[in-house]
Amino acid sequence: MPPTMTRRIMCVGFVFVLANAVATQLFAADLKLRYDRPAPDTPRGWEQEALPIGNGRIGGSFFGGLASERLAFNDISLWTGNADVKGSYQAFGNLNISLPGHDDATGYLRELEIEQGIGRASYRVGGITYRREYFASHPAQVLVIRLTSDRPGAYNGEVELADMHGAATTASGNTMTASGALSLPAAGGGRRGRRDAPAQQSAAAGPTTMSYESQVAVVNEGGSLRTDGNKLAFRGCDSITIVLAAGTDYVLNPERKFHGEHPHARIAAQIKNALAKPYDALRGEHVADYRALFGRVGLDLGKSSANRAALTTDKRIEAYTKDGDDPGLEAMLFQYGRYLLISCSRDLLPANLQGLWNASNSPPWQADYHTNINIQMNYWLAEPANLSECTSPLFDMVRSLVPEWRKATAAEAAGGRDFLTASGQPVHGWTVRTEHNPYGNMSYTWNKTGNAWYAQHFWEHYAFTQDKQFLRDVAYPLMKEVCEFWQDYLKALPDGRLVAPKGWSPEHGPQEDGVTYDQEIIWDLFTNTIDASDALGIDRQFRDQIAAMREKLVKPKIGRWGQLQEWMRDKDDPNDTHRHVSHLFGLYPGRQISPTTTPDLAAAARVTIEHRGDAGTGWSMAWKIAFWARLHDGDHARRMLRGQLSVPGSQARQATTRGTESNNAGGTFPNLFDAHPPFQIDGNFGATSGVCEMLLQSQTGQIELLPALPAAWPTGSVNGLRARGGFEVDIAWKDGKLTAVTLRSITGTGGTLRYGSKTRSLNLKPSESKTVAAANL
Ligand code: FUC
């Protein structure tokens, strides 16, 4: 490279870095959810208005109530059921704070600052300003609430710990403890109690399955603190700090039947260690830990008007529903997905249907793990949005449950029901049903390619990180076993082509051979396994067998109205607006279909989603953002984002319902939770990954810059997105055109940038970064 060019690039790089620093400061102020009233203390108020905090295992939803505040708290592992019984994710308990006399407040503000991972509430009563802070610390493994005011001695009230399963609370000194156990439902007993009501400990309950405990300690500055029955009462205090720890005996270990030590000692130590630190130190260590993940990505999609940015978040969503003009709110939804993943996926178990937040003992769909889109969507953002570490609970769970799934798959074969080879032998390996719990128990229909869809996540972790050890020791063995399942189970048609037998395009149409969803996922599995074998330089013979089978797979087909066929036979209904569009898996999250490599199939995919329409449930709209982004149609992708960020149901021109579920009532609740409806966190995560796909793609082997930039975001920047091959990418654009890009190697060495039809290859050493002005691409 001539020296002048190097200088020019360095200069552009410098300007770019500066521009980014400025941009970060400008939009930092936007990353707050803000409200001028408490969330109503009702099930609907919890779902749509309460605000979540979490440390990746425990979390809570705060309402910001005045005379009575509630933190509905959770531990991600509190589940009924076991490996043989279905069960449901449970609410853990409520931390109730009563502050008599605080009802009549003025100047109320409740907010969640997602740049720091801190919730707040403030208000004035009788000339005194009261403030609260709420956070969930990963380093300290506790939830913390602190109450302060500008008048010494102003706090009088009490704190209560109420268990959601009727366990008694005892208070001693400055600590309350509630220790309990969950039981299996007694034989014949229903599991569906009234939502949000503490379950009654019934004499007819079956055997104990899980032990759990929560502890709350209260520290006062000034005034006095004493036990009052099973509560803690405080008088004349300057400030109150409340620390909550909670846990269960759940361990991700089938050999121990998923149960380990009683959590009492662990929780007591967490409380003790947290109390040993001054509040500022506890808070500081939380913010530093949280920022180390959250701060990796900045997004500026343009400035919102001052009037709009001044609105509370609920009003902002309403205004955005009408005019779609609030790039700051769109960037906030993107970052909120990252906030939520950091807050619910760092330890023990992956994000369930509600992340980890749940105030009910009978949540929708048991708040379980659904394998036909939902759990996968929860993790689509993790790699591109630079939260790779947050995938480990997913990998740990899948690996720990595989032994249970092997048994269930083998039992099906032993009973002669399914999973037999053409010659009647049981197939190798395992697969999954549509629903499962954290003990491996499965329910609802078999989702046969669920095994390969899980395997895709293991491969993608390698593709982004280039972590060869993970590929060799963890991903490849799992992928290979799933390939062996399909080697045994695929059925040859008379002409030699291979099909997945008796599959189901979720949740739609008949069960039959060769549904496109199955065929595409198997193609993806085989392709990733071939690449994995090449990367590791192992298993050549097996790799070649898989490659030969991949050639024989029935491939996606174009049907009579130009659509990508959902089934092998051309029977798709052009008026079908079902929420699942599973046959576009090959477009996203797969890599079988793209406008550059398979333009005809991409055109057919476009026809398919045009007919499915722009409405949808929450996750359905989120998936469509990514579909349109992969088709390089930024304006349509953003139209989907706009629909999703609107008041629920506002995009539906007419309600279409199949079975009991609406197909198009999705949107966003005032607390920015995705509305399937009900609240389902997949749509939050899918919105974030959809925006990633609009700005950066890397699935075809090149790093595509701004592949789907909409006209609505003429000028902006993003920094810190991850690309496959081991890179971090910063992009800036102006007037709809790329201005500069910085490619930073994390582990990658060679990468090819693509912008429109221009390409440029760069060689980097690990940790090196290069900035290229658009003119030099
Ligand atoms: C799948 C979807 C439903 C719902 C459920 C949790 O079965 O079809 O719409 O999201 O998961």
Image (cartoon, rainbow, N blue to C red):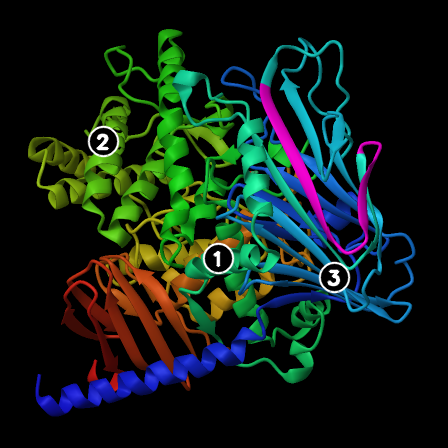
How far across and down, in percent of the image, does residue 413 sit?
35, 12
Q: Upstream in the sequence, badge 1 or badge 3? A: 3
Mark nearer the viewer, 3 or 2: 3
Q: Quadrant of the C terminus?
A: bottom left
Find disc 1 in the rendering and name its residue. Answer: 290
Disc ID at residue 148: 3
- Left or right? Give the position of 272 relative to 759: right
> Which numbered disc, 3 or 2, marks the residue that appears first in the sequence?
3
Q: Nearer the viewer, residue 224 or 267?
A: 224
- Measure how far apart labels 1 and 2 are at the Cα level: 33 Å
What secondary structure prevails in the magenta region? strand
Q: Residues within 10 Å of mark 2 (few under 14, many from 20)?
A: some
Disc number placed over residue 477 in the picture, else none: 2
Q: Mark 3 Cα within 10 Å, few/some/many (few <14, many 20+)? A: many
Per the rendered image, the range of residues in magenta is: 210-230
Q: Count all numbered tags in the image, as a single digit.
A: 3
Q: Is residue 229 magenta?
A: yes
- Image region (quadrant) for ligand 1: top right
